[in-house]
Image: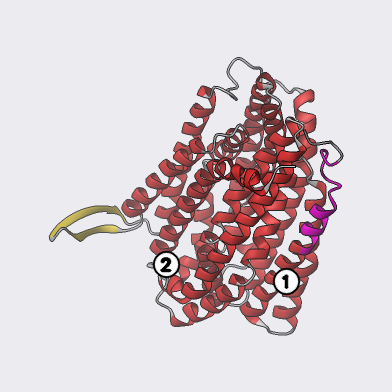
Amino acid sequence: MLGLKNRWSLLPVVLALAWPTMIEQMMHTAVQYIDTAMVGSLGTTATAAVGSTTTVGWLVNSSISAMGIGFLAYISRACGAGEHQKARSASAQAVLVVLVLGTLFTAVTLSLSGYVPVWMQVDPAAQELSRWYFFILYLPMLPRTASIVFGTVLRAAGDTKTPMLVGLLVNIINVVLNFLLIYPVREVDLFGRQWMIWGADWGVLGAAAASAVAFAVGGVVITIALWRHTKVSPKGFSIKPDPQVLKPCLKVALPNMLQRFGTSLGYVAFASMINALGEVATAAHTIANTVESAFYVPGYGMQAAAATLSGNAIGAKDPQKMRDFTRVILWIEVGLMILSGGLLFAFAPSMMRLFTESTAVIALGAVVLQMVALSEPIYGVSIIIEGILQGAGKTSMPFVFNIIGMWGVRIVGTLVCTQMLDGGLIAAWGCMIAHNVLLFVLFLTYWWRGRWNPLKNLKTT
């Protein structure tokens, strides 16, 4: 049995995998902040038009991400066992999946763009704007699919830096084009001098175009990076369907896809009920979601490390490594989420003021953010355990837990509180926190029992 000192010697390995993903998430969140602030300067209607379709985007992206989890479990195990040809063959199958899913979701998102604002109960004054924003944003669906799946393939091989650098490029392009496409020609005071800056004056549609171009470039660049990668390059391998690779990947991916589809559909229903509460509630919810996302960065960065290390440990048949890294990563996660939750609670009003001047929106958003800040540590534990299970290829029970939590607690609770009891946004976010608490109890109990762990009965060396 390794002592505490040896266990914590895994800390550099954990952080080496986690920090690039954290930086990537932080950059993505920073751009969300900038997008929201830039669009927010156009008025509450513009913010509502953009934010009201955000959850539909989560539905699309999370369904694609689920396929990536199937490849993560397969490739991380292959790398842990030193079977690099097997990993490269799986990478080639990932190319096939990107082509199929990218084409499918392009057709689906573009054809439904006119209906989404109506389904989401967007204010009639903002529906046309929301429709075109959604259409433009999802034009480059194929490269967006490549970014999601190929980024996961690289992380499975232990390369978290490349997706981070590609994310940095995407974010820089997005911000620069936002600056040029959203606003009209204007004078800017810089270094004590007045500079005339060109602007397209496209408003909300300029924000959509900027993101679309950035996503397209990111998809192309990460595809090139994958092709050149030493461990998981698909070059020279066939992309024809290979059942020996696809079946185990799909076995992991399908429950995860159903989970993400079900929970994302829940987010859509949740947002739709909030949109029905009016413009102030919609704007406060949209901005609070954006603010909150920054404080989940430590959780999702550590989750990526947990998934990769779990798959590696199983591939190497090393139960001691599984036990030790799990304990280390859970303690780190709890500490980080206590810190991030404390900061969110303290600075919630100030963070809301970054995105809007509406006192009503600021006040409402600050209250719900301070509420959710208290649940950050327990949500972090659920995130890590789910990552460990993903690396182990155990995605069926997380599917069950998330569906029960989303539909049995959050959606039913919000329906009762907002539609029957007139509870408003605060009551809706209270239901969301109850959902997080239930996930914590379910995941912790399942992990502690250990039935998911294929290494549980192996002797340590």
Q: Which residue sits at x=68%, y=23%?
A: 82
Q: Amino acid at mark 2?
A: Gly
Expressed as whole percent of the image width and height from the top left, the position of residue 178 reads 37, 53
Q: Callout 2: helix, strand or loop?
A: helix
What's the magenta region?
441-456
Q: Which residue is mark 1?
A: 434
Mark yes or no: residue 102 visible: yes
Q: Callout 1: helix, strand or loop?
A: helix
**Numbered circles on residues, count:** 2
Expressed as whole percent of the image width and height from the top left, the position of residue 300 reads 60, 52
Q: Is residue 232 left or right of residue 206?
A: right
Q: Amino acid at mark 1?
A: Ala
The quadrant of the picture occupied by the N terminus is top right
Q: Is residue 412 left or right of residue 329?
A: right
> Nearest the camera: 397 or 144?
397
Q: Which residue sits at x=49%, y=28%?
A: 225
Q: Earlier in the sequence, mark 2 or mark 1?
A: 2
Q: Residue 40 has which mark?
A: 2
Furthest residue to the left?
193
